[in-house]
Amino acid sequence: MLHRLSLRVLPQLNALVTDPPVRKRKRLVMLVPGLVAFGIYRLLKQVLPLSEPLVLLGFSGCISMLAAIWAYRQGRGGTLQESLRQDGTQRWVWLVGWIGLVYSIQLSLLVLAILQVFVGYDFLLHPEGPAMMAIIISCTSVTRDAFEIGHVQRLMHQGVVVPTFPDGEALRKWIPLEIGAVLKWGALATIMGIVGSWLLFRIGSIELQPMVQSLLVPVIVASIGLMAFFAGETLYAQDQKERRPKTWLSSLWFWVWPSLTFSATYFLVLMGMTAFVFRVEEVSQLGFVAMAACTALLLTVYTLFLGWRKSYEERLVTIPESLQSCPFVMGILQKSKAAESLPSLADAKIGHGNLVN
């Protein structure tokens, strides 16, 4: 779910996809796949064994892949043939395979886990209601994100400078550059997740542990994620004399969203996978500890990266949006910005309509 975090945490991406006209059109686009998914589910529920978790997840993924293609084209504009030629096969494989299929399955598991843990509405006992919600919610969310990604891609094609495209490539290039910080914060987060989950077993019986762990492990992980985000900003800003002060309100907001929200999301996805893919009826203490460690590691690496990237972008892209679509102006600014970049980013190039990714 790094793409979702990037679209909301990184300032420029957030500004591009939350512009009022874009939001208005996005709401209209999101209505269609949800209604279509509901209709397809009603037609095929008597034919397909959708009470089986793997069948349901595969069915949800197939519908969401089609929704991702349609929504991306709505945001991207132009025909599918033109988009495939201009954007490249790799981007389309990522969009359909990761956003359409994998992300959809994650969201479906999230919905099933929430219903089981907090509502007592178990898909394995009462499949129809949870299955319908899992399909519709995942399809609608995939539609939203695919539309936003398509909109960003369209702006890039028009010449708007987008330093970070939300496909994870920037993260993969960044990890080797800051491997020391990644290992340090990753180890700290893993240990804190393990210790925190283990201590929570002293609260309540084993039957209450799914709810206790789902509520309190994200609190621990979110706190580590907030510190990692600030540390990530320091990685880039350590040689700068001036840094923007943080207010308690802004820190609290980031702790709630995205740190706490996505910590709970990752943990519940893992719980959904345990319950509905591996069919584990009662998760052991070791299982909860492993899920907490994975959640803490993943979110901390993501927030560390996003803190670094946010600080980097705020220094790199400091021009008015009215000038960002002018390739000539950006070509001039490229030289001055390149001189200010860190040595580790000296090989980064600002292309026509695209910067470091």
Image: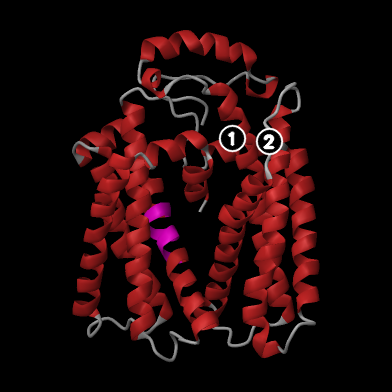
- Which quadrant of the figure has residue 150? top left
Q: Which residues are magenta?
A: 98-105
Instruction: Say which label, 2 or 1, has the lower sequence index.
Output: 2
Compared to residue 58, the image places residue 190 above or below, namely above
Q: Residues within 10 Å of mark 2 (few under 14, many from 20)?
A: many
Three-letter code, disc 2: Glu
* Front-most of residues 130 and 85: 130
Q: CB under 8 Å between callouts 2 and 1?
A: yes
* Front-most of residues 7 and 78: 7
**Relative to 62, is 345 on the left or the right?**
right
Compared to residue 157, the image places residue 198 above or below, namely below
Q: Could you tell me which secondary element the residue under label 2 belongs to?
A: helix
Residue drawn at (42%, 76%) of the image: 54
Residue drawn at (44%, 87%) of the image: 124
Please tell me the numbered disc located at residue 310. Answer: 1
Three-letter code, disc 1: Lys
Residue highlighted by disc 2:
233
Give how far across and how far down residue 280 sits, in percent. Answer: 58, 84
Q: Main secondary structure of the magenta part?
A: helix
> Visible in this render: residue 88?
no
In reply to whether residue 103 is colored magenta, the answer given is: yes
Give how far across and how far down residue 26 sits, in percent. Answer: 29, 49
* Front-most of residues 183 and 235: 235
Q: Could you tell me which secondary element the residue under label 1 belongs to?
A: helix
Residue drawn at (72%, 89%) of the image: 205
In reply to whether residue 338 is colored magenta, the answer given is: no
Residue drawn at (32%, 39%) of the image: 151
Image coloring type? secondary structure
Give how far across and how far down residue 5 sits, in percent. Answer: 52, 48
